[in-house]
Amino acid sequence: MEAQNIYLDFNASTPLAAEVAEAMRPFLSQHFGNPSSQHWAGVPAKEAVEHARQQVAGLLQCSPGEIVFTSGGSESNNHAIKGVFFALREKGNHIITSQIEHPAVINPCRFLEKLGAEVTYVPVDRYGRVDPQDIQNAIIPRTILITVMHANNEVGTIQPIEEISKIARGRGIIFHTDAAQSVGKIFTRVDHLGVDLLSIAGHKLYAPKGIGALYIRKGTPIEPLIHGASHESGRRAGTENVLLIIGLGKACEVAKKYIGDDKICSMRDRFWKLLQDNFGQKVVLNGHPSRRLLNTLNVSFVGKAGGEILSGLDGVAASTGAACHSGSVELSPVLKAMGISPEVGMGAIRFSLGRTTTDDELERVIDLLKNSPLLFPQ
């Protein structure tokens, strides 16, 4: 990364942590055996995989046997949703989710609708937060699964997972949460959350891309997504990706010291104050003002196009919440579900901070914005 470049898109992907790279290095040149083999080459690989399983379980405060390694967050979500549906389709066919879920949740639900599933997509308020009462009202005798993300990837709003889990448990319904954005940032102890299934995406917490995990509470009925041999205790066929599993395990171990990082939260809040001081009512906050991820700041420059502003910030990596097509603006499904008007939503930019973000970088972004001809025409 060049010195002048500023990376503020940590919700999209994180760099590999130095400790993670160091842990993976020996497995690039040695310990190459198949972890299912019982000889001298396979045993070290197997031991490394099981150690990584303990590291992931340590972050979630669950039993190592409840962790299944996957190829990432999308596979984990697909496994959770499809796996419960196929395991319990004789009991019921109804799934409850929210309107602002990641496509890795929405699209599996859409797919299952083609196979006879009934799906209720509950709304959110203007902050992007689900009302547990709406979940309660959506339950019918055929409901077999509730899936609501822990924290939204775009605006950072944290959902009332503990309240929803009490409702699910009281009705004997399996509860899944997509925790791709929250793991490693805020506490994700599964017993505190009360979930039966929880998805992890490695590249969101300084591990490699292409690795993830699914927490499956002991006793939860679920059909494997990938059928084959008896890998992962028969829950996910395919030879384990030892190298990437090592990386995920180490990333989860390292993440413990960054949970609830006040430094990142303070920088985010200072950045928001600088935006308000310099742009006043031209900039508004999207998402919940307090119940949101400590690193996420989604703001709209009212009446402007976020994509155009961002393209003018040379060397700054961030994300937008709207796309322009032939003169018309298409808001993201998240902003649309929140009831954000096109005039506001079209100017949305998500700045997501990370462990390497500095105050100097944020001040440089402010300077670039102040010099933007789109915000301050010459």
Image (cartoon, grey):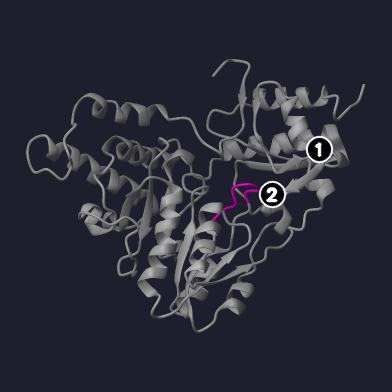
Residue 169 position by quadrant: bottom left
Number of callouts = 2
The magenta segment: 149-156
Q: Is residue 292 visible?
A: yes
- Mainly helix, strand or loop, the magenta region? loop
Q: Is residue 349 left or right of residue 370?
A: left
Out of 21 and 257, give the one closest to the viewer.
Answer: 21
Identified by mark 1, the residue type is Gln
Name the residue at the right extreme: 378
Identified by mark 2, the residue type is Ser
Q: In this view, does 172 lie to the left or right of 329?
A: left
In which quadrant is the N terminus drawn?
top right
What residue is drawn where x is 34% and y is 47%? 56
Residue 155 magenta: yes
Residue 326 circle label: none
Which SS class for mark 1?
helix
| Crowd band around label 1 with a 10 angstrom C-alpha radius: few (<14), some (14–19), many (20+) | some
Residue 276 circle label: 1
